Image (cartoon, helix red, strand yellow):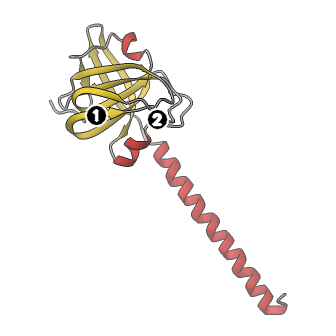
Amino acid sequence: MFGGRMGRRLSLSVNFLVLLAGLVASAFLFAEGARAEAPLQRLEFVTQTGAHEFRVELADTPGERAKGLMYRKHLPEDQGMLFVFYEDGPIMMWMKNTHIPLDMIFVSRHGMVTSIAANAAPMSEATISSDGPAYAVIELNAGAAARIGLKPGDEVRHPAFKR
């Protein structure tokens, strides 16, 4: 055991390191929370029944696309996630670690619905395919596509899609 001034210095150094570690951890958690609290973007489907607005989180990096809606227990009815892949091609998705049943809407670069995979089963590792080229995928709560009358050929309005 250290005594006197040496002991106080060691004690101060340890306290400083503990405080520094706490600040670093807090900064990391704040940054992670800031990403989770990112503003939602407006997205609109135009169907035979009219325009239907949703608010979506954008997943446009490999890490964000890989995580998607995994581990979430709830998704508000008017919200979803937009996965942008930045090139046309076949897209394969799955529901691993996803607790919410979802509709997956595959969309072309020009904002046209190309196919819909309705009511994807939670926690499944089965592959869900775009059945042809797609540029993006929109995930909504299961049943949302049917509720708004969405079908292939319908329009999607969002800045990610070129007109």
What residue did someone put label 2 on?
A: 69
Q: Is residue 76 above or below residue 27?
A: above
Residue 120 x %, y %: 43, 22
Q: Amino acid at mark 1?
A: Ile
For label 1, the SS is: strand
**Looking at the image, residue 34 lies above or below residue 2:** above
Q: Determine whether, in the image, residue 72 is placed left or right of residue 60.
A: right
The residue to which callout 1 is attached is 91
In front: label 1 or label 2: 1
Name the quarter where the N terminus is drawn.
Answer: bottom right
Sooner in the amino-acid sequence: mark 1 or mark 2: 2
From the top left corner, tell me how far across and down residue 152 is, in percent: 24, 16
Residue 93 position in % (x across, y down): 36, 33
Quadrant assignment, res 158? top left
For image coordinates 37% across by 30% down, the residue present is: 127
**Residue that appears at 59% across and 61% down:** 25
- Residue 111: image location, x then y, percent: 21, 27
Give the amino acid at mark 2.
Answer: Leu
**Front in this rendered view, residue 143 or 16:** 143
Q: Is residue 105 above or below residue 41?
A: above
Few, some or many C-alpha atoms within 10 Å of disc 2 (few <14, some 14-19, many ≥20)? many
132 left or right, relative to 105? left
Q: Quadrant of residue 161?
A: top left
Residue farthest to the top, as pictured: 49
Residue toward you, 94 or 12: 94
Q: Mark 1 and mark 2: span between their CA atoms?
A: 17 Å
Quarter of the view holding residue 159: top left
103 to the left or right of 137: right
